[in-house]
Amino acid sequence: MTRTAPQGISFDYGHIEPVFVSFDDLDSMGIVHNTRYAVIVERALTAYWDGLGYTYANRTVGHPDASIAVVEFSIKYKMPVSATGTVGVHFWTTRIGSTSVSYGYRVQSVDGATAHAEGQRVHVRFDPATMRPTPWQDDTRATYESLSGPAAD
């Protein structure tokens, strides 16, 4: 099934979320600082899941599966982002475990022509009372399955 992002890019799997790159994301050379790519990916995932009701407001979690902790984040830098403005973050699930999920992602130009960075992120659902991993609920697992894409390298 082919999908279309808000920017008009067609893609076959996952989701593309637009994210605005702010002036404070840039370093002294005028390119996005290497540590800010993780923030850009986080902004994309937060916007996507927030839109599905996995929110945080007034110390209240909007869905039980919103309690997660990142356990792995890897990145390969391809081409610097050298301006403020919108980029697209294409993300997809590569593996869905009982308490964890692995994403592949690509930070790209809005038109999809330039890959700025790509990598993997893994997070685990935990019970906030015990701080122990706990299984995903069925609706969350179904959403992860709808994002399925190619397995990680």
Image (spheres, grey):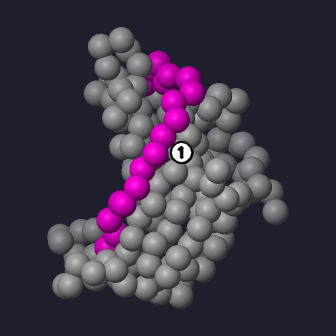
Please state the extent of the stretch shown in magenta in the rendering. Answer: 66-84
Quadrant of res 109: top right
Q: Is residue 73 above or below residue 97?
A: above
Residue 6: % across, % down = 63, 47
Residue extending furthest front? 153
Q: Secondary structure at mark 1?
A: strand
Three-letter amino acid code of the residue under disc 1: Gly
At label 1, counting other C-alpha atoms closer than 10 Å, the crowd grade (few under 14, some 14-19, many 20 or more) is some
Q: Residue at x 30, y 13 (%)?
A: 28
Residue 66: % across, % down = 36, 73
- For the residue pair 62 and 39, the one nearer the viewer reads as 39
Q: Is residue 9 above or below residue 96?
A: above
Quadrant of res 39: top left
Q: Residue at x 35, y 26 (%)?
A: 33
Q: What residue sits right under mark 1 in the picture?
A: 119
Q: Is residue 150 above or below residue 114?
A: below
Q: Is residue 152 above or below residue 54?
A: above
Quadrant of res 123: bottom left
Residue 153: % across, % down = 64, 50
Q: Is residue 112 visible?
A: yes
Position of 72 with respect to 28 (left or right) is right
Q: Residue at x 34, y 69 (%)?
A: 68
Q: Is residue 41 magenta?
A: no
Q: Is residue 79 magenta?
A: yes
